[in-house]
């Protein structure tokens, strides 16, 4: 029971538009046990669209097409589907009358071109649109089913929920698709895969996907079984072995990001956090405060880009800056300790470094970042150098800072300087 989704429209191929319809459709299809095996975004090109439809119907039982049902010349979905299936289109007087009534209700005359929306592919069942003028169509072609859905999300969601979901539920045999997500920090993507590949490779089901973004790693296990119980058992079998192999490197078994997990720990312990940032320019504080209720544990912080502000606001000794420079273990340590003392927080995180792209002398090459964590029982400083662009270096530093704090909260942080 596989499905493919095609989003139609040349505007969807620009950098300003994102296909969100497929996300909704995927969620609903997965809930029925239907696996989405491919998604396509195709511009307003009839020949290309027709070929894509033919190809999809060879590989998948269900094809869902969103967009291209409007009245203009570039709305080609009906024409392309009819061509791909070798069927005629028939003008439907009832649909046309319904569209005309919608215009009358708005005190407008229906333009002649809107009659195009009343063209129905031979053998199709009409899908009513209670949010717009474009009706959808449900077409059965042998074992294949093609669903033509409007592009505007509010129209598509209503139509699919009312018209398509019940019909699909009556066709699809009972099955379940379930996913287990692990989020990991503090290791590289290659190390992660080397650790868990021997576990997941023998299994075709569940399917395992490893994702990486700015130091945040995710492992997705996707099980497809006849019942929810079988899917849960399979996820527990493979997931249990992965959990054992990764241990405390797993910080979340849900989709919660690191800042959420850290915040939950701080709130549970009744403890507080403050930050001091130089190279990240407030990015760490932004992540922390993006979580609703973060005022329960986050006191605030400082953005001390200039040397003078590190001295004036954080109390970093001038001699430390003169001797070791702003990008150093000693400065990071002094920033964290100064922040904690001034704001009275349980913990303080400090970041200083050179995010690049230029090199600021041999002691501060591009990508060099120092992160310090001050706590009631001492200060830990770590440093890394990432060969990456400025935005990624800053993001990696914020991830490392939150990972350090979470490890401290979990009692597994190492009180030493770690470098690489």
Image (spheres, rainbow, N blue to C red):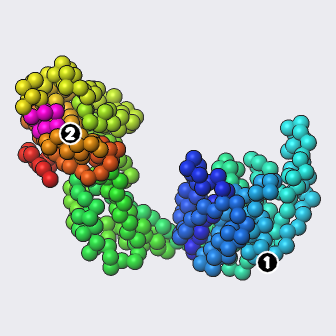
9 lies left or right of 273: right
- Spot occupied by residue 190 in the image (x, y as percentages of width and height): 26, 64
* Residue 114 point in image, percent of width and height: 86, 52
Q: Which residues are magenta?
A: 324-331
According to the picture, the residue beneath numbered tag 2 turns out to be: 360
Asked if 118 appears above or below 50 in the picture, the reply is: above
263 within the magenta span:
no
Cα–Cα span, label 1 and label 2: 67 Å
Q: Is residue 185 visible?
A: yes
Q: Residues within 10 Å of mark 1 (few under 14, many from 20)?
A: few
Residue 86, disc: 1
Of mark 1 and mark 2, the one earlier in the sequence is 1
- Report whether 264 appears left or right of 83: left
In the image, is residue 84 above or below residue 242?
below
Snapshot quadrant of residue 42: bottom right
- Residue at the spot 67% in from the left edge and 56% down from the top edge: 9
**Residue under the point 68% across and 50% down:** 152
């Amino acid at each position: 029971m596989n499905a493919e989704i095609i989003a139609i429209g040349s505007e969807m191929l620009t950098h300003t538009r994102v296909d969100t319809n497929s996300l909704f459709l995927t969620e609903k299809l997965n809930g029925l046990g239907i696996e989405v095996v491919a998604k396509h975004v195709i511009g307003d090109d009839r020949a290309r669209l027709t070929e894509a439809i033919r190809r999809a119907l060879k590989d998948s039982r269900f094809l869902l097409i969103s967009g291209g049902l409007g009245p203009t010349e570039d709305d080609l979905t009906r024409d392309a589907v009819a061509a791909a299936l070798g069927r005629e289109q028939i003008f439907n007087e009832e649909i046309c009358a319904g569209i005309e009534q919608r215009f009358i209700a708005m005190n407008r005359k229906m333009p002649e071109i809107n009659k195009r929306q009343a063209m129905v592919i031979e053998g199709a069942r009409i899908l009513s649109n209670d949010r717009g003028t474009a009706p959808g169509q449900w077409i059965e072609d042998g074992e294949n089913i093609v669903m033509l859905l409007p592009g505007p999300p509010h129209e598509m969601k209503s139509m699919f929920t009312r018209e398509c979901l019940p019909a699909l539920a009556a066709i699809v045999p009972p099955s379940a698709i379930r996913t287990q997500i692990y989020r990991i920090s503090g290791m590289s993507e290659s190390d992660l895969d080397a650790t868990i590949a021997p576990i997941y490779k023998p299994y075709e089901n569940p399917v395992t996907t490893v994702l990486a973004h700015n130091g945040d790693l995710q492992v997705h296990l996707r099980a497809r079984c006849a019942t929810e119980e079988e899917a849960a058992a399979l996820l527990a079998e493979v997931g249990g072995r992965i959990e054992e192999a990764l241990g405390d490197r797993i910080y979340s078994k849900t989709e919660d990001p690191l800042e959420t997990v850290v915040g939950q720990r701080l709130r549970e312990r009744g403890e507080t956090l403050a930050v001091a940032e130089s190279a990240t320019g407030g990015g760490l504080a932004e992540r922390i405060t993006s979580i609703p209720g973060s005022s329960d544990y986050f006191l605030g912080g400082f953005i001390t880009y200039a040397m003078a502000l590190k001295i004036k606001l954080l109390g970093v000794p001038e001699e430390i800056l003169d001797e070791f420079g702003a990008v150093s273990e000693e400065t990071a340590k002094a920033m964290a300790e100064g922040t904690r003392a001034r704001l009275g927080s349980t913990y303080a995180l400090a970041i200083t470094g050179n995010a690049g792209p230029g090199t600021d002398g041999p002691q501060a090459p591009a990508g060099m970042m120092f992160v310090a964590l001050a706590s009631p029982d001492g200060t830990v400083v770590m440093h890394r150098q990432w060969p990456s662009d400025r935005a990624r270096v800053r993001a990696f530093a914020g991830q490392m800072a939150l990972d350090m704090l979470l490890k401290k909260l979990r009692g597994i942080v190492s009180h030493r300087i770690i470098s690489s």
